[in-house]
Amino acid sequence: MSLGVNAGSDGAVRRRAGSRAALAAAIKALDPLRLVGAVLFVASWQVASAVTSPIILPSPWSVLKRAAADFWSAPALSYYGVEQASLYANLIYTTENVVIAVAFGAAIGGVVGLVSSRLWLVRAVVDPIMMTAGTVPILIAAPFLLIWFGVGRASAVSLVTFYVAVILYVFGQRAARNLDPIYEQYALTLGAQRRQTIRDILIPATVPELLGGFRIALAGAWGLEAVSELLGSQSGMGKILEVLAGATDPQGILATLVTLGAAAMIGDAVAVALIQRFAAWNFVRS
Amino acid sequence: MLNSRMIEFIHVEREFTRADGQSVRAVDDVSLIVPEGEFVCLIGPSGCGKSTLLQMVAGLTAPSSGTIVSDDSEIDGPGRERGMVFQRDSVFPWMRVIDNVEYGLKCRGVPLEQRRSVAREYLRRVGLSHVEKAWPRELSGGMLKRVAIAAVFANGGKILLLDEPFGALDYVTRRQLHNVLLDLWDEPGAERRTVLFVTHDVDEALTLADRIVAMRAGRVADDISVAAPRPRTTDSLLRSDMVAIKHRLLTHLGLESAPRAGDAA
Amino acid sequence: MTGGANGRERFVAFGVFVALAALWQGLSLIYTAEAQPGEPMIAGWQVLFTRTLLSLSDYWQGGLGVPSVADGAERSYLAAALSVISHLLYTLARLVTGLVLGGGVGFLLALAVSWSRWSRSLVEAPVQFLRALPLLAMVPLFQLWFGATFLGQSLFAAYGVGVLVFAGTVNAVRNVPQIYIDHARSLGASRGQVYRTVILPAILPAMRSVALLCLGAGWGAVLGAEYLGAQSGLGYVIVYAQQFAFLDRMFLISLVFILCTSASYWVVQRLFARWLVWAPASARE
């Protein structure tokens, strides 16, 4: 199953793009059926919203209008105690937290994961913790972090950092263990030192899988950050959601969700671009 | 002065413990001397220990008992002196072709200009100048093998080890690569490298080798000198002495029964 | 891996947990701050299993012949046990309902959609949209729609699980090697037979990963929903205790929770190990 790196490319080996291949790819991306599907979805939403009251399901158009209106300035929010009264400012807050946490978590988790594949002691110590931690939803730590760090960035960022680190640890370890030993053997017979094999083989070869894990972790990080803000924060998209829920404002909630979702999609696109850039060579035969 | 004992196996043994606890002797008391510049083929059926023997020369695994001496020093791990071409593709997918060929030189700290020109020269000699900047995933199996061969040759090293390198390729590509390999090995004006080539293709061994060592069940079963002059053509294989060797080898491989009466032993 | 290395690793794993427990005990001795008089922030193990455990009886709502503390009864181990079990059952009920509903609907829909390439392309965009919306952020929405009820929380979990199962199953079906399908057709199998006898077994290895992912998402969704407005369940107890900074109670309940999640993973993994007896090791990853 390929919910990771190769999602969307059928996992097939990419050919160097000739102009013909590029044209075919463009047509496929703009697959008419997909467009039809999207249109049908929006249409059914519109119909459903017409049938139910706006309190239950606002229409797609009203949601978009609300998102646009509140994006730069939403004075109503300040009445509810949100520090900065606009979707934009809170989106920045949330994004900052996500980026910091994902960067740290990926670095720590990825490195420890790679190291754990080489040093049995590291793996023996970290694995049991990671495996148990992996079964528990990271949310379990949220109330504790709230008490220890109080309300603010630190608790949210540390929560997401843990989450990302665990995922990258698993991916890093798996990538290193799945790495065909033949590459290292070959390098040694060409006269490379062990140290050089880490730089020239372990790291480049595991990058695609690590980036795949990064993409998955990033996708989940947005929701986790939002929930953490929901539980205790003065800013952020989660705070807005909490406030609007209390005010029974489904239109606002959906607008906020859509904006958050858009940010997540942009983040995903960035991750995919990273993958294209650093894993262009990918066909590690394992 | 040529080293008459370039590779020396002294009562080499290698045992493995299988998953069910049983002990398997992959290599059983092998003693052999290979002089410098000789092209030796190791041939035998699957599981006869020939690949294990090669891995030990490469230094990727150590003998359970006995020693292997190469170029007057005991083997103690892999190194560029004993370059190896593997059966599966070992060329690094994340490096372009030219970077792959110059990799060994880079590890040694050879400066860029110099190693580039060496790499380009060997790429030219294996016929891959036009794909210098390509990614390995864009190349065919035969081309990847040429890159691996070029890389090992570019790296210098007096000993060359090949572990069924052409086994996964089709017949035509295999024959082409024989020529590529022999051209590189038989460089006019330079000293020939010592080659250990593992295969179970009898014709391949007869085409390439100065000497064929047949193995069976971990032991050396036969040690045959191949006298036919180089370059070897299709007709060379039809010489009576070559045909006799072929029968001998097929017998060792278990594909033929005892030699027919009247043949030269 | 030889038996020696395996045993060594198990020993270290055991040692790690012992060390963590000892570390906790050590911390409890150093960090003696108390949230309220008599309620230490970091409670040593001896406290956890006595006073903290007893205090959990506060959360027992009464019934079954055991009166609740709110009605003036004494704290007791029995009440504590009952409270833990009852809240655990609430959480489990939400989880199981969500898994069955979401998993079932998602799976069936995915199979239906995979029938033709057209339907697959049609649903691709909406599914991508739904997946882009961060799941946990949608709790307020579901609360708005269904109120803070058992139904609402279960439906939330079902939604999260359903989207995952749907996407994962469609992907898995798409990745079934065509060669198996061709082989079956050339032996005369009808389309329905191909579905039953080729596609379903062939996607099992992938479904294992999907199942474990869903389990994680399910627990997360249920916990999140309970944090944000339930009146029962382990998540509710934790958040309720958090409001008084009863760290020791939170810790004890969390331990119970961790035991449950680990056990559930273990169960699912064993189940799939039996179903996947035929699969090569790499496919079982």
Image (cartoon, coloured by chain):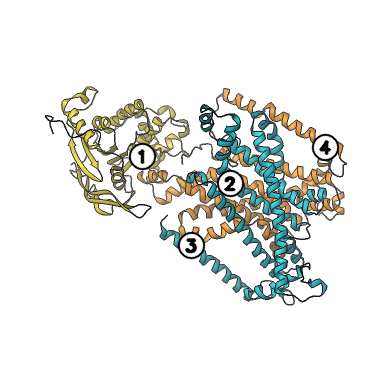
Residue B118 rendering spot, x and y as whole percentages? 36, 35
Most foreground residue, A201 or B33: B33
- At label 4, which amino acid type do we have? Ala
- Tell me whether marks 4 and 2 sit on the same chain: no
The alpha-carbon separation of the residues under discs 2 and 3 comes to 25 Å
Residue C37 rendering spot, x and y as whole percentages? 74, 77
In the image, residue C56 above or below residue B22: below
The alpha-carbon separation of the residues under discs 1 and 3 comes to 36 Å
Chain assignment, label 4:
A
- Tell me whether marks 4 and 3 sit on the same chain: no
| SS for callout 3 | helix
Judge the density around disc 1: few (<14), some (14-19), many (≥20) Cα neighbours within 10 Å: many
Residue B86 tag number: 1
Most foreground residue, A109 or C24: C24
User: Which residue corresponds to mark 4?
Assistant: A48
Which-is-in-front pick, marks 2 and 1?
2
Residue C10 tag number: 3
